Amino acid sequence: MALGYIEIDEERCKSCGLCMNACPKKVIRFSKSFNSKGYHPAEFYDPEGNCIACGFCYMMCPDTAITVYRYEKVAANK
Ligand code: SF4
Ligand code: SF4
């Protein structure tokens, strides 16, 4: 189960790929589409829910394009 997810501001992304190299779960890839500056922006792709919300992508991004969200457990029976 995913521990979190990220959002990428496509217009800020310059396609450097640092977030992809940093991601231990390899859940970021290049989009096939272009942003308005002509870059293929990074895209979060995590169909199996592998993101662990570690924040490495966020820390590596030189263009502050990434926001990390962590799911919070609010109740549990065990
Ligand atoms: S928070 Fe961690 S696991 Fe999730 S996309 Fe970023 S680097 Fe990958
Ligand atoms: S590190 Fe930032 S600028 Fe570089 S590809 Fe990832 S989101 Fe885009």
Image (cartoon, rainbow, N blue to C red):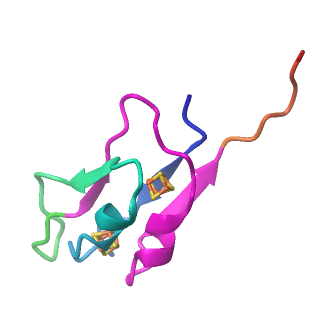
The C terminus lies in which quarter of the figure? top right
Farthest bottom residue in view: 62
- Residue 67 in percent (x, y) is at 52, 63
Residue at coordinates 40% horizontally, 47% vertically from top-left? 25
Q: Nearer the viewer, residue 16 or 14?
A: 16
- The vertical placement of 49 against 69, above or below, is above
Question: Looking at the image, in which quadrant does ligand 2 appear?
Answer: bottom left
- Residue 2 in percent (x, y) is at 55, 35
- The vertical placement of 21 against 30, above or below, is below
Q: In the visual, does 4 lie left or right of 30?
A: right
- The vertical placement of 70 against 48, above or below, is below
Q: Nearer the viewer, residue 2 or 21?
A: 21
Farthest front residue in view: 24
The N terminus lies in which quarter of the figure? top right
- Residue 18 in percent (x, y) is at 30, 73
Confirm whether the magenta stretch covers residue 75. Answer: no
Q: Quadrant of residue 16?
A: bottom left
Q: Quadrant of residue 10?
A: bottom left
Q: In the visual, does 2 lie left or right of 74?
A: left
Confirm whether the magenta stretch covers residue 55. Answer: yes
Residue at coordinates 46% horizontally, 37% vertically from top-left? 50
Q: In the visual, does 57 lie left or right of 2?
A: left
Q: Nearer the viewer, residue 73 or 23?
A: 23
Q: Nearer the viewer, residue 38 or 31?
A: 31
Residue at coordinates 18% horizontally, 53% vertically from top-left? 31
- Residue 8 in percent (x, y) is at 39, 60
Residue stretch rendered in magenta on the structure: 41-70
- The vertical placement of 2 against 44, above or below, is above
